[in-house]
Image: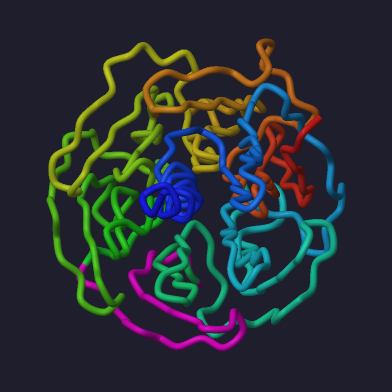
């Protein structure tokens, strides 16, 4: 009798522990909620993760006439949850005398606010701008008197700027590439005072620069584009003076050794194009053929090797152009400015958005 009574007492306790054990360790793709008292198992389905599909994207016009004047060879970055546009050149090519020293910001790409029309780094174009350690960094480019520069500036608010380095260790240049990788700022290529180069430099503080390689595996070039993607640095396009735009993609894990992708590239060779990472894809947008023709195509790649065209016919609503700027902002690609095949510069803003 005592044994029977003991079993009656222990059985409910053991049942509860068994249910708890199953609820904790049961292997499933679903979250489980266990109602021990009622001995019920209630499945709670996890929210399905949306799969990004590039083919549903379409270009939409944010504004035909932005607040900033028409220009190309400017820079745009995302900083403090806003778009920031810096410098560039206005007028109509082949006039390159109207360089700007202004800074504009926008929270939506349509409405722009003038931050200053006289930044301390002066009128310039064809430099590079990155966001690094909670600051905007401006590097080199063409300054007054059509002189190449190798100065380095930084700002923690986009308005007030500090000269970090008057003359960096790398040679004065324009049309080079830059990115942030491995907690360092990297610059490479461009046209230096001695001509086109293929050197690679990096810095952990913007002040002290280290030469990774004087001659990378890729040919000397300018108007190349560089991006960080999938734990590598990637380089696309560019041009050697007098030649057509390059039709190739390179990548590196250390800036010293570079590997060229072997897969046939379907997009035409180009320079002065956009090259950026967005929604776990690499994107190539617009650019220049090398002989007076601006592209208005859009290409994407999941691995940097195999490329697909967003529109099979290569047609977008915006006119082909070079030295445009593109950034990923709120998981959308914003494209703005540039020089059309006619030589006219633009100040329109477009968004690659879900249809």
Residue that appears at 73% across and 19% down: 315
Q: What span is in magenta?
A: 144-169
Q: Is residue 173 above or below residue 213?
A: below
Residue 241 occupies quadrant? top left
Note whether residue 195 is visible.
Answer: yes
Number of residue marks = 0
Note whether residue 24 is visible.
Answer: no
Q: In the shown orientation, is residue 284 left or right of residue 63?
A: left
Residue 137 placement (x, y as % from top left): 44, 72
Tell whether position 214 is magenta: no
Q: In the shown orientation, is residue 294 left or right of residue 132?
A: right
Q: In the shown orientation, is residue 275 left or right of residue 345?
A: left
Residue 322 occupies quadrant? top right
Tell whether position 158 is magenta: yes
Q: Quadrant of the C terminus?
A: top right
Q: Nearer the viewer, residue 285 or 271?
A: 285
Q: Is residue 207 above or below residue 10?
A: below
Residue 178 placement (x, y as % from top left): 38, 55
Residue 264 occupies quadrant? top left
Q: In the shown orientation, is residue 103 left or right of residue 168?
A: right
Residue that appears at 61% across and 27% down: 298
Residue 15 placement (x, y as % from top left): 48, 46
Residue that appears at 42% across and 50% down: 14
């Amino acid at each position: 009798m005592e044994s029977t009574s003991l079993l009656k007492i222990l059985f409910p306790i053991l049942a509860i522990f068994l249910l708890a054990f199953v609820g904790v360790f049961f292997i499933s793709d679903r979250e489980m909620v266990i109602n021990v008292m009622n001995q019920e198992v209630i499945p709670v389905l996890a929210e399905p993760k949306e799969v990004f599909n590039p083919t549903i994207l379409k270009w939409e016009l944010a504004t035909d006439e932005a607040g900033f004047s028409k220009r190309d060879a400017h820079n745009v970055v995302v900083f403090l949850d806003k778009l920031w546009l810096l410098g560039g050149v206005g007028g109509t090519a082949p006039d390159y005398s109207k360089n700007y020293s202004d800074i504009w910001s926008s929270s939506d790409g349509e409405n722009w606010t003038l931050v200053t029309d006289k930044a301390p780094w002066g009128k310039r174009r064809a430099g590079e701008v990155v966001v690094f350690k909670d600051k905007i960094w401006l590097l080199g480019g063409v300054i007054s008197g059509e002189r190449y520069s190798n100065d380095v500036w930084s700002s923690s608010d986009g308005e007030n700027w500090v000269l970090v380095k008057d003359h960096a260790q790398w040679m004065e240049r324009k049309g080079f590439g830059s990115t942030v990788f491995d907690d360092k700022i990297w610059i490479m290529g461009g046209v230096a005072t001695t001509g086109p180069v293929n050197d690679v430099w990096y810095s952990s503080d913007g002040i002290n620069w280290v030469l990774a390689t004087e001659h990378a595996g890729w040919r000397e070039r300018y108007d190349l584009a560089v991006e960080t993607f999938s734990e590598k640095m990637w380089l696309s396009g560019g041009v050697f003076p007098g030649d057509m735009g390059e039709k190739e993609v390179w990548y590196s894990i250390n800036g010293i050794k570079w590997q060229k992708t072997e897969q046939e590239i379907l997009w035409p060779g180009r320079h002065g194009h956009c090259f950026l990472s967005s929604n776990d894809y690499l994107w190539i947008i617009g650019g220049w053929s090398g002989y007076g023709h601006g592209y208005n195509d859009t290409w994407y790649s999941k691995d940097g090797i195999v490329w697909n065209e967003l529109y099979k016919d290569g047609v977008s609503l915006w006119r082909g152009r070079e030295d445009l700027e593109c950034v990923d902002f709120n998981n959308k690609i914003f494209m703005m400015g540039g020089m059309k095949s006619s030589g006219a510069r633009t100040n329109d803003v477009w968004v690659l958005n879900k249809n």
